[in-house]
Image (cartoon, rainbow, N blue to C red):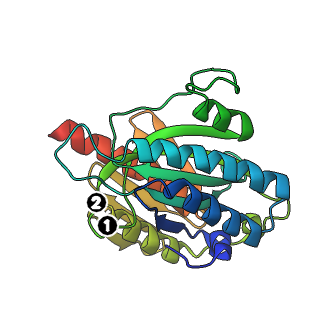
Amino acid sequence: MEVKGAWGLVTGGLCAWRLPGDESGPAAARRLVRRTMSELRFDRDVIEDGELAVSETATNALRHARCAESNRPPFPPELWVWARTVPSPQLIVSVFDGARTTAPHASGAGLLDEHGKGLELVRQVTADWGSTPTRSRVDTTSVPGKTVWFALPLPRDWPGLHYRVHPGTAAYHLLLNLTRRGFEGKRSTTDDGLSVLVLPNVNVWVHRRTFCWWSTRHRYLRRPLIDLQETTELLVRHLDTAHQRSE
């Protein structure tokens, strides 16, 4: 579920914006991240790290906004922000672009090196970072691409750590998220109140406090219901991979 205010992240929501597809994009991303983190009462030094990291990831997205691997027109970058509690309480900031096959990497260059220092800087000022194939969120038509994301530690008194999500509400919003990303499914409810989402190549059980599914034949995943957005991204990746293999 997308929310208009930063405090919606406490209840499992997501803030998502389309960024300008020109040189003003990184500045817009910095402004949005600063405003969101300030509303959530992050310490000033963590906010500054977030601004620095999103400036670099937005610059990277702008560089790859035109998809070299297809005839699609340039796709404007998007900025997504949500919170997760697993593997640790973190704010996740993701910048989406439409160039799925262009994988970024930190070069290991020194910070004073003018070439390849951007993502190395992201690595140094954040708790974690990475790049993930996914689909766009902001447009009504989902577009394949990737995100470059980074994680920052949440404040110690983050209220979402104690927030309880109703399983039926969680199941509804998870299915809605996936449908908007191009994956149709059905929801059923057992006699004891357990919800099951039947999706292509995977079923997701929604228990009292967790989402559960088999990501592979030998790997069973569990995520707290409050981690709705993180669960959505994991399932989009799973479903997208299965879809590509079937083509």
Q: Quadrant of residue 34?
A: bottom right
Q: Report whether residue 79 is seen.
A: yes
Taking the image as shown, residue 57 lies to the left or right of residue 77, namely right
Residue type beneath disc 1 = Thr
Say above or below: 227 vs 61: below
Is residue 138 toward the left or the right of residue 114 in the image? left
**Which x, y percent locates residue 212?**
50, 53
Residue 227 can be seen, yes or no: no
Q: Residue at x 17, y 40 (%)?
A: 246
Callout 2: helix, strand or loop?
loop
Residue nearer the viewer, 188 or 131: 131
| Image vertical order of residue 121 relative to residue 169, above or below | above
Residue under pointer 2: 183
Tell me the number on the disc at residue 179.
1
Per the image, label 1 sits on a secondary structure element best described as helix
Quadrant position of the C terminus in the picture: top left
Crowdedness of circle 2 by 10 Å Cα count: few (<14), some, many (20+)? some
Depth order, front residue of 232/195 = 232
x then y, percent, for residue 154: 76, 56
